[in-house]
Image: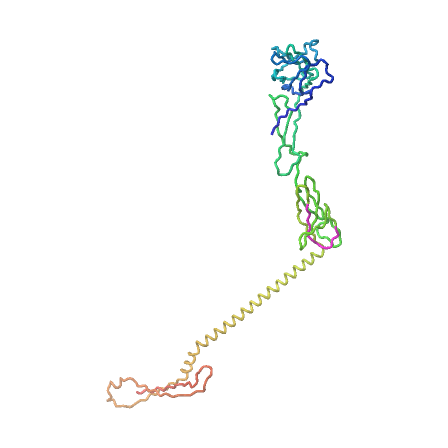
Amino acid sequence: MTDMLLSFLFIPSTVAACPPNTHLFITAPTEMEALSGSCLQIPCNFSDAGSEKFDSTRPVFAVWIKNHTNFRLNPENVIFNSSVTFNIYPMNITGNLTQRNCTTLFSNLITNYTNTYYFRIMNLPFRATAACDPLQITIKDSPWRPNITIPGDLKEKESVTITCSALTPCPHSPPQLTWNLQQDSHNKIEENAPKNTSASISPSGLVSAGSWVNLTCSSRAKPPVSSFTWFKKSRDGAVKVSEGEIYSFNVTDGGVYYCVATNDLGNQTSAEINMTVKGDKLWQHIGVIIGIILLLILLCLIIFVCWLKSKHQRQQQTQIQINEKQVVEEPGSKREEVEENIHYSEINISKHQASSHSVQDRRQEQDTEYAQVQISKPENNLTQSPHVQEEVYSEVKKI
């Protein structure tokens, strides 16, 4: 965003140190600067005083005189006259003289135009020079330094409008304003809540009970950090233990500490510091070892119980199979025992019969006669029912 700024110092006309016969006064800057090769616009309004008055119905002309008001002694000091076509200096009245506006544009400036100038009105019979209101004009070879305006309150991550302005004496050729970002600038203006907050311990590592330690809190913030607060974690929550950037204390036991940095824009909490006292670590290791041993013992007990259950189940299953086999094999055994107790006795009886027997009689099948002998054996409680009888057959063959 570029803002062209035209700034002049207006000083009201005053009759102090003015000739007593002054009848013309102008309202214009007392000092103005312009750039060589450019132009200068002179804002101007006039007023009359005295017995003779300005009359806008009559012809009116404007005159600019340099160096001195008495142009009769030095007519070359008249550098501009609106009543003539040719003028020494490139000036032009842009205001409406009949409305008492004497605004003038001074073009094609060079350093030699640096001087004091006076304005004069010719409105016959009214003629007057503003001797009490001289205008000092200075022509420079180099432009003016621009002015950068930054709002008072800046916060990080919020948008901001920065205004750059430069003197613009010539409205027809305003200055070219260019923005450049300086990477390594040390004049950055910003405000932010605390950030990069960290806590450190000295000495680091394991500390001995009864020794002194220093906890240090650091943070980046603008405006600067207004307070550092230290906390220690406990079973009931965080407990405030100290204030200040450094917290020094005599160690009695370990613990977890952290700090909070605060400024007007907010706060930030550091990472936690776990402080361990010598000896606490040993007991921690012992506790871990005991826990592992107990876990192994429990594991072994579980495995042993599972093994016992599995063994008992296998024994029961084996016994059931044996009983089932005995039940299946028992009838067969009985039959084998009965068969073992059956005795056959074959007796061949030859009968001397006459040959006159017919062939048919010889071809007759042998008649087998069985004699059943019952043998009572003692009772067997395991495999036999009461009063089991064994049968003995005697086969008698008749020939």
Q: How many marks?
A: 0
Image check: 239 left or right of 360? right
Report if residue 290 lies within the magenta region: no
- Residue 51 lies, in percent from the top left, at 68, 13
Residue 379 at what x, y percent from top left?
A: 45, 86
In reply to whether residue 257 is colored magenta, the answer given is yes
The picture quadrant where one finds residue 115 is top right
What's the coloring here?
Answer: rainbow
Dominant SS in magenta: strand
Look at the picture and state if 128 lies above or below 379: above
Q: Nearer the viewer, residue 306 or 220?
A: 220
**Where are the magenta residues, as a range?**
249-260
| Residue at the (66%, 17%) spot, across then down | 47
* Residue 282, image x, y percentages: 69, 57
Residue at 30% in and 90% down: 351
User: If the image is split into quadrants, where does the C terminus sit?
Assistant: bottom left
For residue 348, what is the image quadrant?
A: bottom left
Compared to 368, does 51 lie above or below? above
In the drawing, does residue 187 fall left or right of residue 369?
A: right
Which residue occupies the foreground of this view, 262 or 363?
262
Which residue is outermost to the front? 51
Q: Position of residue 49 (x, y in %)?
A: 68, 15
